[in-house]
Image (cartoon, coloured by chain):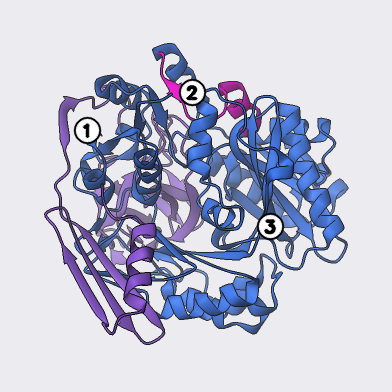
Amino acid sequence: MELTSEDVRDILRLLDDLPYSELRLETARFRLSLRRAAGGWTQQTEVLADATVAVADVAAAAAGPGPEADGAEMPAVAEVPAVAEVPAVAEDGDSLVEVRAPLLGTFYRAPRPGAPPFVTVGSQVTPDTVVCIIETMKLMNSVIAGARGTVAAILLDNAQFADQGTVLMRIRQPA
Amino acid sequence: MLRRVLIANRGEIAVRVLRSCQRLGIEAVLAASDADLDSVPARLSDAVIRLGPAAPGDSYLSVDAVIGAAVAAGADAIHPGYGFLSENPALARACAAAGIVFIGPSAGQLEAVGDKLTARRHATAAGLPVAEGGEVASPGDAVGLAAAIGFPVLVKAVGGGGGRGLRPVARPDALAGTVELAMAEAAAAFGDSRVYLERYLPSGRHVEVQLLGDGRTVIHLGDRDCSVQRRYQKLIEEAPAPLLGDELREAIRRSAVAFGEHLRYRGAGTVEFLVEPESDAFYFLEMNARIQVEHPVTEAVCGLDLVAEQIWIAEGNPLRIGQSAVTLAGHAIECRINAEDWTDGFRPTPGTVTTAAFPAGPGIRVDTHVQAGTTVPPWYDSLLAKLVVSGRDRAEALTRLRAALARCQIDGVPTTLGMHERVAAAPEFAVGGVDTAFLGRLLQPEPAAGGRRG
C-alpha cells in the first residue's frame, strides 16, 4: 500500500509547524519528496516497486487490428490536412504529390476492419477526399488527399505504425 | 461483498479505482496491455494480468481479453473505468454470462443511452426538453429537416457521445457535404454510420448532473459545469455550476433525476445538458453511464467516494444515503493536464515524462498516473493528471488553483499546463459561467486551418 493523498496531507500538517522546507522519504517501494516553495508545497512521488505480473496470458485471439475493434470505444474524430510535399515530376510529365502522415500514429486504410478501403491505387481523388486514417492517442485523424488526381501508390500496409512525415501515398496530378 | 476486482483500464482512472479498492480491503488486479505492464497503476495494484498487445483493439477494447483476464485472475467483479469498454453492453452481458459482477449499469441501460437517438426518445418520454432535431437517413434527407430546425445545425453521430462525432453546419449549402463526411467518419469511428441533426447552440453552457441509482431509487449529487472545452472535449470542470439561478439549477437537477428514474438507473451516471444562457432554456444532451473523468469535483463538494459507491451498488446494496442526506458545500475546479501541445492545435505529444512535480496541501488533490520515467504511449488518450482544487467558495478555489498551477511541473512532453494558467488568469473565467465558445475566443488566433504541419 502506497501513500495516499490523505497521508501526504497529514505529513504536511506536521511539517507546517516545523522549520523544515524539505522532506525526503524513501522506502523499498516508494520515494516521496516534499518541498516548500513560493506559495506552498510541492510533491514528487515515485513508485519504485516492480509490478507483479501474473503468468496468465489472455491476449485476445480474435479481433485483428483495426481503428475500431468492436464499436465500443468512441475516439475523437479530427480532420488533419495531410502534409503535402512539393510535387515531384513523373516521367510522363504528370506531377506526383506525396501524402504524408501529419502526426505519428497507426495508419488505417479502411474506416473499420472488414470495410472497403478509403482508396485503392487508381482511385480518383479531390483535395478533400479522405484517403486514410492516422490514429494517435485515440484521436482518429482523417487524412485528406490534399491534391486532385489519381492514387498512384500506397506505401504502407494497413495498421502499420507511421512516424510523423512518413510518406503514406502518392497522388498523380495530371500535367 | 466483493473480494477481488479486475480493473479493465489504465492511466489515472486505474490508479483512482485501485485506491478505492485497497481502502475498502478489496484486492485490485490490473488488466494491462503490453504498453502498460510497468505503469504506475501496475506497480500499485496487487497483481497484473497481461491483457494483450498495446493496440487497444487487441487489449482494452477486447471483450474476450477482458473476460479472460478476469477469469484468470479469479476476480469476482470488473471495474471498467471510463472510455474503452465502460459503456459497452457486450461486456456487461459477457460478465453476466461468466458469473462476474459488472461494476456499472445493466446492459439494457447501457443500450438505452448508448444509442443517442434512443436516449433522445427516453428523454422525451421522461419529460425532458430535447433540442429540435431527428435522424437523417441520407444527405438529401437532411436538407428538409435542417430547414425545419433552422441554421446553424449540429450533425451528430448516433453512436457518438462524449463530445465525439459532432459537426456544426452554419449554411444550407454546406449541409449535404458535411452529412456525407460525418456519416463516413461515424462509420470509421463508431462502426455505425447513422447521424442525426440537432439545433446548434454555439454559445451554450455545458451543465451536467451526477446521479446515483440502485435500480429503485435515484438521487443526484449536484451539478457540474464543463463549458471550458475545445472541439467538444472538456478541459476544465467545476462543481457546482457557477452563476446558475436557483430555479434553473433545481429544474436541471430534477430533470436528471427524472431521466434516471425513467430508466430505473443502477450505478453512477451523469446526465448532460446544454443551457442557453440568454433564455435559461436547457436541453438534454446525453447520459454517460459510467464514472466520469470529472467526478472528483463532485466528490470534493459532496464528500463521497463515488467509486466506493459504485462498488457498494454493484454488490447489490440499496443506496447508502437518501437525497435529503446529500450535503453540498464549497466549490471545486478540475484541470485536465494532457500530453498535448496547446500552442500547436492541441497536437498529441507522446513521449517520456522526465519530471512530474505536483502541488500538495489543503484543498488540493492530484489524480495522476505519471512520475519521472513514465512513458506516454501513442496508443491511448492524452490525460496525464487531473489537478483538483477546492475551497469554501469559488473565489477561494480559483485563488488556490492559480497558486497550485504555478507549482505543477511536467517535463519531457509538452502539456496543457500553460493553457490552464491562461484560463485561470482570464477575467471572464474569474466571473464564472463562461460558455463553450469561451476557450476558442481566449486562445485566438487559433492556428489557421491546416495548422498541423510537420
Mark 1 and mark 3 lie on one chain; the one further toward the N terminus is 1
The span shown in magenta is B99-113
Badge 1 and badge 3 in a common chain: yes
Which chain's residue wears label 2?
B
Dot 2 alpha-carbon crowd within 10 angstroms: few under 14, some 14 to 19, many 20 or more:
many
Residue B206 marker: 3
Mark 1, secondary structure of its residue? strand
**For mark 2, what is the residue?**
B92
Chain letter for the purple part: A
Q: Considering the image in quadrants, where does the N terminus of chain B appear?
A: top left
Chain letter for the blue part: B
At x 36%, y 45%, the residue is B19
Is residue B343 visible in the rendered image? The answer is no
**For mark 1, what is the residue?**
B50
Q: Nearer the viewer, residue A8 or B120?
A: A8
Displayed quadrant of residue B8: top left
Mark 2 and mark 1 lie on one chain; the one further toward the N terminus is 1
Dot 3 alpha-carbon crowd within 10 angstroms: few under 14, some 14 to 19, many 20 or more:
many
Residue B72 in percent (x, y) is at 25, 21
* Residue B112 shown in magenta: yes
B387 sits to left or right of B172: left
Residue A54 in percent (x, y) is at 16, 30
Is residue B62 visible in the rendered image? The answer is yes
* Residue B108 shown in magenta: yes
At x 56%, y 32%, the residue is B192
- Height in image: A4 above or below B114? below
